[in-house]
Structure formats: structure tokens, C-alpha cells
Image (cartoon, rainbow, N blue to C red):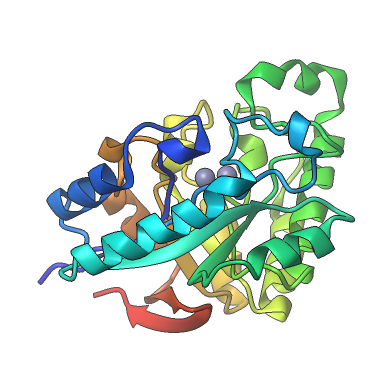
Amino acid sequence: MKFILPDYHIHTRRCGHAAGTPEAYVTAARAAGLSEIGFADHIPMYWLPKAERDPGLAMQEEELAEYVAEVVRLREENPDLIIRLGIEADFIPGRTEELAAALLSAPFDYVIGSVHYIDGWAFDHPAHLTGYAQRDIRTIYAGYFRLLQEAARSGLFDILAHPDLVKKFGYRPEDDLRPWYAETAAVFAACGVCVEVNTAGLRAPAGEIYPALDFLKVCREYGVPVTAGSDAHAPGQVGYAWEQALEWLRAAGYREVAVFEKRRRRAVPLE
Ligand SMILES: [Zn+2]
Ligand SMILES: [Zn+2]
């Protein structure tokens, strides 16, 4: 039987900017031939006062228990599929205690850490593109990779999402990024976190999987485990460009992918 990667990065309409019920994603996963998926909706915006939490960016705090119950129910109703309960959690420096407390509130199978903000600037949000003109691109990249490393060191995450998201809109410095890749991969390895191959980059102006192949190769050299995610925001995106994701992994030298249950990692061969 042909190997199909688990898709560990699936959003639902609960996050306010994705379409589709969790059921619709399960139906789509089955249709795409996947045997293992994981939901990773955005954690409530714990670092902001409640009144400032944008319902278009993440679920509200009171929805977290419903999200968990819904995924658990789907798991029971679909015994032919492996359905994991994940969460995508923003890394915000100085706010790790609040995040740690939030992560204890549910029996997550894995926690995906994300850097979506540099000093409060949502650099991956199309409404805030002017920020690229206001800053030096090298400073932006340096800030991004430092935050990603800090996120890995926080010990709060099992997986670091879309680890060169900063290229999303195609703004790239002329510098050789390999020193950043090597430094970051070394931190991931030392902290025991996974890197995520995320196909959403193919749907963005960057037009490339996250992370760049050179970055993934150096992660492999350092022995960093890897997971895969489509970052689906619509049911039709489950397993998006999944053949390319598998090729990307193999091209980087990976022979296995990590899977999680109750935050314990196991390796599955890519065949
Ligand atoms: Zn993300
Ligand atoms: Zn996501």
C-alpha cells in the first residue's frame, strides 16, 4: 500500500478564518486516502485582554472545551481513522506562563508552536504588509529566526510550525540564510522539537513549501524529527500537495515521520 503522510495541521471554522465543520475535514481526509489526521486550531489569544481578542483569528476561551469535545467525539465516531487532538499556539515572549497554563487545560496529543508576530507585528497577515516597507528585511528575518529559536527553547511545543513563514509574501533578503538555518536546526535538535513541513507556502506568494529545502536538509543532518501539515483552512485543502510534501521530505533525506499520542512521539517509516 502506498504510504500517505499524516496531516497534523488542520484548522476548522472555529478559528474564525477557516471554512468547514470538523466533520467535513474528516470526510475530506478519508476521500484523500489519509489514515491519520490531527486538528490544530488556533489557541485563544491568551496574551491579549479578552476584549481585544479578534474572533477572526482564533477561537474564544470558552470555545476551547467545545473544540476538544468535538475532536474526541469525531475520534469515537470514525474508528477507521486516527484522529489526533492538536492545537496551534502562538509563541509570545514573556507570556509563556499563561500559555503553559492554557496547554494544561486539555489532553492534547501535540502542541504546534508558531511565530506569527515580531514585536507585535503580524507579519504573516495580508492586512499588515506595510510593515515590510517600514523595516529592514534583514532585521525582520533575524527577528523571526531568533523568536523561532526562543519558542523551541521554551519547552512548550512538540512541533515548530511553518518554520520559515517569514518568506510568505516573497520578501527575502539577499543574504545566505544557511547560517540561520543551521543555528535554528541546532536549537531544535537540542530542545527535542520537531520541524514541520507545511504545504501552505505553496498557496502563498512565496510559492514554496515551508521550510526551504536547505533548511529541511540541515534539520535532517541535526537529527530533528519531522511532521507534515497542510495548514488546511478549507476541507478541500486536507492533504494539500501531499505528493510534493513527501518528495520534499525524501529530498532532504528523511526516511521517517513523527506521530504523536498524548504528547509522546514515535517514528513511522516513510514507506
Ligand atoms: Zn500558523
Ligand atoms: Zn495554521
Horizontal side of 157 relative to 83 (left or right) equals: right
Query: Does the image show residue 155?
Result: yes
Q: Where on the picture, by quarter, is residue 184? A: bottom right
Total labels: the figure holds 0
Task: State whether residue 80 is above or below residue 245.
Answer: below
Q: Residue at x 28, y 59 (%)?
A: 74
Q: Quadrant of the C terminus?
A: bottom left
Task: State whether residue 146 is above or below residue 254.
Answer: above
Q: Where on the picture, by quarter, is residue 34? A: bottom left
Q: Picture coordinates of residue 191 (x, y %)? A: 71, 77
Q: Work out whether residue 159 or residue 248 is closer to the camera in this orientation and state it.
A: 159
Q: Work out whether residue 151 or residue 15 is closer to the camera in this orientation and state it.
A: 15
Q: Picture coordinates of residue 253 (x, y %)? A: 43, 71
Q: Residue at x 28, y 66 (%)?
A: 75
Task: State whether residue 27 is above or below residue 3.
Answer: above
Task: State whether residue 180 is above or below residue 158.
Answer: above
Q: Residue at x 76, y 30 (%)?
A: 52
Query: Does the image show residue 214?
Result: no
Q: Picture coordinates of residue 210 (x, y %)? A: 52, 48
Q: Picture coordinates of residue 119 (x, y %)? A: 87, 38
Toward the left, the furthest residue is: 1
Q: Quadrant of the N terminus?
A: bottom left
Q: Work out whether residue 169 or residue 110 is closer to the camera in this orientation and state it.
A: 110
Ligand 1 falls in quadrant: top right
Q: Where on the picture, by quarter, is residue 266? A: bottom left
Horizontal side of 82 relative to 54 (left or right) equals: left
